[in-house]
Amino acid sequence: MTILKLAIKEITRRKLNFILSLTSVILAVTVLVGSLTMLRMHDIRTTQIILQKEEETKQRMLELEDDYRKIMKNLGFNLLIIPKDQNLGDLYVEDYASKYMSEEYVDKLSNSKIMSIRHLLPSLQQKIKWPEGRRTIILIGTRGEVPFVHRDPREPILTAVPKGGAVVGYELSTSMNIKKGDSIRLLGKSFIVEKCNEERGTKDDITIWIDLAEAQLLLEKPGKINAILALKCHCYGNDIAQVRKDIAAILPDVQVIEHGTHVLTRAEARDRAAREVQEALEAEILNRKQMRDEQELFSSILVPLVLLGAGIWIALLFFSNVRERKSEVGILRAIGVRSRHILFLFLNKAVFIGTFGAILGYVFGTIAGVALGGPVITATLDVRTFFIALFLALLLSVLAGWIPAYLASQQDPADVLREE
Amino acid sequence: MLRLDAISKTYRKNGTLIQALAPTSLSVEQGEFVAVQGASGSGKTTLLLIAGGLLHPDVGTVHILNTDLYSLNSNQRSQFRSLQIGFVFQQYHLIPYLSVLENILAPTLAHSSSKQMDRAVNLVNQFGLEHRKHHRPGELSAGEKQRTALARALLFEPKLLLADEITGNLDDANAKIVIDALQLFSVNGGAVLLVTHDVNVAKHANRLIMIKNA
């Protein structure tokens, strides 16, 4: 006969006491494991949602890329026509051509039957010291869009600056307190401010636009321009070489470079869309986090309460069991069983209750957690949670049973036997 | 074998001192069967519990096999009790969820021994419990319960058997079986201290000791 065997015999004899204790441990572990599983399911679900949304975003971005490619294909591309002898390095450093060509070039193009260019914008640009404003500015003379002679008139994409008028960049207007209708002096000539541009964040903010002819006069470049911007150029397959070839046939003395690229435009559009998607994703993550925090708060209140309730209930059942077994403990002590063996006898029962309660509670808790946590494809068994449940269940039942077991072990057998 | 020297016991109950056992001395020798009689409340059971090392006397000493029982610590006394002393009570004190055989083997909880199974089976046979050995106490008659309790007390072949009103719930036939067993135990060299009200039982003892009211 062993203490363990005696404990098992007692459990099988007094099933109700054991089942009631076991039920309370199962309940406590179910709530604990259910809460942990539900939180874990939530985390897994959140990861799945984020991965799914990221995949959707990726797919959407590919679609967007394709859409923009198609749109850009229809829009065509922009070209900058500059003098053939212009050094491109200088152009990129200064951002405008230092060489000049005849303004007649634009007229040649507009009079031609070239079909691959839609809009023509001749300009004369130069960085100058603005003596009246004591600033360095970029002066651009423009005549607006030059219409093609052999085509139906279209609405111009850029209107010309009237003679005697000026359009002022944002930085100049704000720093020098220039407003629409003001009169400004530029290189000794007065201009009425027609418009102050909004902020663009480019060199445009330190630019003044005036009529091309007046600019030619001020810059002493009569009949000269240094760039023709050809916008929305378009040909079959968007083959820039073909457009260059068409232009070269008309203007052999120029070179043609792409002004701004499709890639850049598409990238800007894509980045904007990506930002929106990212913001939506972050909002979803925040929402999921708030839901998790609420679940965690609820669990952090519920689980300790259930554990405490279960502990009290088990302790009461143990007290009842000790009382019921008073005579048994008395005779065991009388036949020489030591008090620590009596303690082990009751604690063995507590260990059984804790172990079985943990196993069954883990199963029920996992099922409940999965049911409440939403559909998750990933496997849900978690060894770490099981060992947490086992540890807490054993701790709960042993702690709850400890005082009754100790009191039983300290019971005076003489008192019991004399009473009997 | 057993020597009680001037032992006494007083309880405090509800603030009042109650003398459970007046100063008493007695001895029981090896092979002797001693009966103790006295009126209710005279301290017979208290005497038995003190003699068995279960109740510390206020004064006096208890020697069993020349060992001062109360000079041992609790664990040593438990060990000594499990091997040298057998207890039998009127209420049997069988463990209700164990079978007859398992109840007889219960002392092995204190002192495990591989040889005790054979000894337990022999005791089952000796006390006519073969057909009941797998039955639980609830399924036994009073006589069978007391025989089981007696067999349990004899498992480790103790030198001293302490019995408290063990025939109180038994019919004559079963009482005779139990008393015969006690006599056999003493004849074989054991010492028996039996507390009883029953004059017919007491007359089987070698010696009768009367305790006056404390």
Image (cartoon, coloured by chain):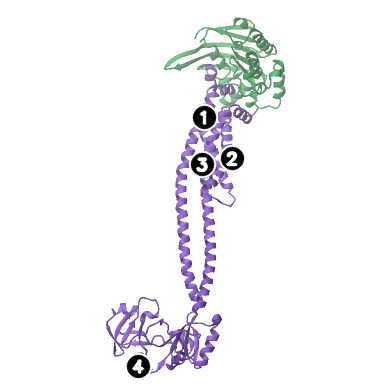
Chain colours: A purple, B green
* Marked residue nearer the N-terminal end (1 or 3): 3
* Marked residue nearer the N-terminal end (4 or 3): 3
Q: In the image shown, does B77 or A315 lie closer to the viewer?
A: A315
Q: Secondary structure at mark 2?
A: helix
Q: Residues within 10 Å of mark 3 (few under 14, many from 20)?
A: many
Q: CA distance from mark 2 to mark 4?
A: 95 Å
Position of residue A272 in the picture relative to residue A215 (left or right)? right
Judge if badges 2 and 4 mark residues of a common chain: yes
Q: Residues at badges 4 and 3 in contact (C-beta under 8 Å)?
A: no
Q: Residue flagged by tag 4: what amino acid is it?
A: Leu
Q: Residue flagged by tag 2: what amino acid is it?
A: Ile
Q: Secondary structure at mark 1?
A: helix
- Which residue corresponds to mark 3? A31
* Marked residue nearer the N-terminal end (1 or 2): 1
The quarter in which the N terminus of chain A is drawn is top right
Q: Secondary structure at mark 3?
A: helix
- Which residue corresponds to mark 1? A317
Q: Image height check: is B158 above or below A5?
A: above
The quarter in which the C terminus of chain A is drawn is top right
* Marked residue nearer the N-terminal end (2 or 3): 3
Judge if badges 4 and 3 mark residues of a common chain: yes
Mark 2 vs mark 4: in front: 4
Which chain contains the residue that carries disc 3?
A
Mark 4 vs mark 3: in front: 4
Q: Secondary structure at mark 4?
A: helix
**Residue B52 in sight from this viewpoint:** yes
Position of residue A35 in the picture relative to residue A224 (left or right)? right
- Which residue corresponds to mark 2? A359
Q: Tell me residue B97's x, y (percent).
A: 61, 24
The residue sitting at the front extreme is: A152
Residue A200's disc number:
none
